[in-house]
Amino acid sequence: MTSSGLRRDAGPDGARVVAMLRELADLTSDEAGAQRVAWTGVWQKARAFLREQLRGLPVTVRTDAAGNQWARLPGGGSGVVIIGSHLDSVPDGGWLDGAYGVMCAVEVLRSLAARGPLPCPVALVEWADEEGARFGHSLFGSSAVAGTLNVAEVRELADASGLRLGDVVAEHGVHLDRLDEARQEIRGARAYLEAHIEQGPVLEREGLPISAVSGTVGVERHRVTFRGQTAHSGSTPMDMRRDTFLAAAATALAVRESAVRHRGVGTVGAARLRPGIVTAVAGETAILVDQRHPDAGALEAMRGEVRRAAEEAARAEGCAVSWEPVFQTAPQPFAAGLVDVVREVCTELTGHARVLPSWALHDATPMAGAVPTAMLFTSSAKGISHAREEDTPEDHLRLGVEAFYRTVCRVIARSAGGDAAG
Ligand code: GLV
Ligand code: MN
Ligand code: MN
């Protein structure tokens, strides 16, 4: 026994995590990349794969009212330590985004189960629809559990084929009227810990395999729709057009300018033109605008600038413009005491005490508002993610498994002492 009440053991097997990830990728990818988009059959296949990995462990596996899967390993005391991430991917996505954190959590559960009685329960969670790839709204399952999901707002969101979120999730056993029940899953939780790839270039540039994460930046996401006049591409003189695509394109340039000015980021990642044919001026164009910044004031300024630019562009092209919120989240710092634990573990393993902000969102974002939370990053090759080229050197993936395990053990030991965040 150690002072934390945990028996010593051989620790986690990083190679097994990599093997599980490769098997999952084979099962759920095609030549364009990972296809585990939430609320699809391929995603369900990934979730069944997770249940197979958990078979044989002394855990209870169940799905909550928001569609999140939980595997609970019993322990003494009451405050659960939660570990996990997501299995859903963007279309044509990478093999590691989300899946890495889930498979790290499986391996940590396996190692903890082998160590005998735990001083507190530990739960693996696999969150439903982190990406928001289909409906534009990220962090569905984790926001529901944290109590920050705006049900009225998500109910009417539609995918590209016009299917409504409320109807689609119901086919997967999730009923928006009962989402509140999911909040009980984290009652009395002591900590939430997530391992994830960085998805950006910083660690690779600095020659570091892993780091702690200070928190996530704020995000503003809107659908901006321009309405003008559909007209013939050949016979409509240039000075008689009300071209919605040109207004949208001018707005996209303003998104970039505003992001550069404020040292934030801004993206127009999706555009839909109607009728969307080469022989017609587009009478309607809808774009999705995503803006991010670590500072709430700067983010607000970026949102205002782009809104004014969209109005100006619409006026210049003789169009109308409407602006609908799709998703918002404020900059979210993680629990300082837990960030310190991750930083200490990284320093032990690498000699470096790097702490990065995350420009990508994570399920840790809503969780941090409800439970003391921290994250561990593993480097990303060329900083590429949300693409099939996404990759991480295998030795970094393995080191991340060890770092995550040490972090969880230390947090459990603190929990046994009564305060995970302290
Ligand atoms: C999800 O990966 C996001 O950062 O929006
Ligand atoms: Mn992710
Ligand atoms: Mn992602």
Image (cartoon, grey):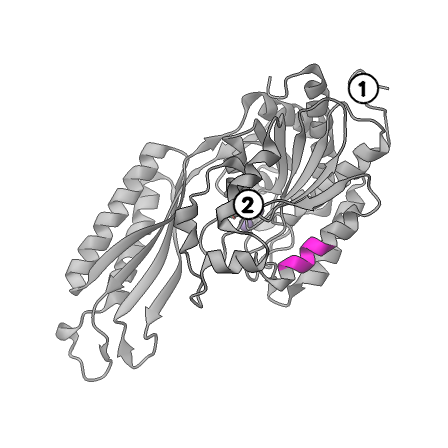
Instruction: List the single residue furthest toward the left.
Output: 239
Task: Tell me the kind of residue under disc 2.
Answer: Gly
- Majority secondary structure of the magenta segment? helix
Which of the two discs, 1 and 2, sits closer to the camera? 2
x 75%, y 57%: residue: 23
**Residue 20 on image: x %, y %:** 76, 51
Q: Is residue 171 shown in magenta? A: no
| Amino acid under disc 1 | Gly
Residue 109 seen by the camera: yes
* In the rendered image, the vertical position of residue 227 relative to residue 201, given as above or below: below
Q: Residue furthest bottom?
A: 235
The residue nearer to you, when weighing 226 against 264, is 226
Which mark identifies residue 5? 1
The residue at the point 15 percent across, 79 percent down is 237
Point 76% across, 37% down: residue: 109
What is the distance, in whole Å, between disc 1 and disc 2 at their CAs?
33 Å
Res 141 label: 2
Pick the front one: 206 or 32? 32
Q: Which residue is drawn at 38% across and 41% down?
A: 264
Quadrant in the picture for residue 84: top right
What span is in magenta? 43-48
149, above or below 385, in the image? above
- Mark 1 or mark 2, earlier in chain: 1
Is residue 362 visible in this depiction of the protein? no
- Secondary structure under the numbered disc 2 in the rendered image: helix
Is the C-beta separation of discs 1 and 2 under 8 Å?
Answer: no
x then y, percent, for residue 360: 50, 43
- Left or right: 99 with respect to 302? right
Q: Quadrant of the N terminus?
A: top right
* Crowd tier of the residue under label 2, counting other residues whose Cα lies within 10 Å: few below 14, some 14–19, many 20 or above: many
Instruction: Sort mark 1 into few (<14), some (14-19) or many (20+) by Cα contacts within 10 Å.
Output: some
